[in-house]
Amino acid sequence: MIRRLFRPNYAQKLSLLATLPLIVAGLCIAALVAHQSRSMAEREIQVLERQLIEAKKAELRNYVTQARNGFMHIYGPAAPDDEEAKKQVTQILSAMIYGKDGFFFVYDYDGTNLVSPRQTEFINRNWAGLTDGNGVPVVNTFIDIARQGAGWHSFMWEKPSTGEEAQMIAYVVGLQDWRWAVGTGVFIDDVIASIATSRMEVENRVRRTFIYIGAITLVALIFVFASGMLLNIRERRLADAKLKELTQRVFDAQEEERGRVARELHDSISQLLVGVRYALETVKRRISRGEFDAAASPLDKGVDGLATAITEVRRISRDLRPGVLDDLGLGPALKALTDDFAARTGIETVFTTVVFRNRLDQEAKIALYRIAQEALTNIERHSGATRVTMDLRGHENGATMRISDNGSGLPTEQDRSHAGIGLRNMQERMEQLDGTIRILSSRAGRDSGTVIEASLPLSHLLPPGDELAAHRLP
């Protein structure tokens, strides 16, 4: 038995030769999918976290602005020693509580608390030198920020509703005549919990992916062992087709993930809309009291906030999954992509195309659009170009997209041996569709720059009579 194990016969050698590459390929694909999924998800989670934090900050800034508008008619004409005016302002701020934990606080520049409606034990006591559980200065930082005008501070603070410490972001402004630091804060433990949940979901998806790939690999191994002695050229071609199909499923999963994240980011815009609603409610109250002049400022802020939310929704949704690609086709989608690129970067961008006699299928449109996205990203980050041209057209052999710039070009072939994931993704997408991609680059002289040319065969162009494509542009 031992001799047979270490001296395999011809059939066993064939089985090992067929199964070992399959096992290695499965492990490599699993590792690659896990790495790419984690990397992409982490980037998207970081974007989501920044969006949520910025929404919280915008909400805080709006609260403080509304509070200042509420007492500015008292503070403006008051003298530095007007105790009656100070008393009126403290009463106004003490009454401005919102949500379960929201409140305004006031400290004088000596560190004495003047307003703390949620934690009244702080009032009229000096808290100079107070730090949170991590040793971060709190009150002294408030005073420093107020002296400079306004700013943000992040620290740990006890939540009034639960009595437990949680991360807080505060926005503080200074009333220099009265030597007051006025501010409010919002707890972001819900943001931290949401991000942790997202990361857990990513790990669960990666774990499921390993299980799926392991199951596929196990089924393939059983099949290979059952029919290993009958392997021939046809079976090897079928194995190649299955590997391509598996790779396509990986790309399809990535596209589905982009769509899901786009919806999640869309939901995060609700934080901006909270600020808009607060501004509109303020306008409504002031109009009902007949204060028409005072209603203009919060109304303008509400309109600006709503415009920002609309812009963010459109930008995030367009970057992750442009609706124009599904509604109008590849040509208008690339035109919108280049127009946005030119407006954002200031780089002169020219896009040209012609109407195809035959239309591209869905896989081809997605592949060319993603290649264009990656190419423009690389141009913006690395090329230093001042002009970019993009051309899309069909011909007797299929369809070709050509992107060129006048930038610094790519590294030499020797330095390009460790190409980034962007170029590898371009090549893999074209290979998956039986297409070709050419990358030409020069780093010196008048002809310096880079040219990327992606070509698809006729097999990815739909027949002229296809009813689905007949009413769409390329």
Image (tube, grey):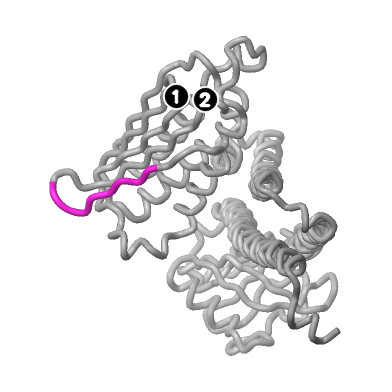
**x and y percent of residue 449 in the render?**
25, 46
* Left or right: 330, with 89 as reference point: left
Magenta stretch in the rendered image: 438-445
Residue found at x 29% / y 42%: 405
**x and y percent of residue 351 in the render?**
37, 28
Please tell me whether the stretch drawn in magenta is mainly helix, strand or loop.
strand
Residue 326, by quadrant, is: top right
Looking at the picture, tell me which residue is in the foreground, 163 or 49.
Answer: 49
Mark 1 lies on a secondary structure that is loop
The answer to whether any part of residue 288 appears in the image is: yes
Instruction: Identify the disc placed on residue 355.
Output: none
Q: For the N terminus, which image quadrant?
A: bottom right
Residue 82, by quadrant, is: bottom right
Task: Determine which residue is flagged by label 1.
Answer: 397
Q: Is residue 198 above or below residue 163?
A: above
The answer to whether any part of residue 308 appears in the image is: no
Q: Is residue 22 above or below residue 346?
A: below
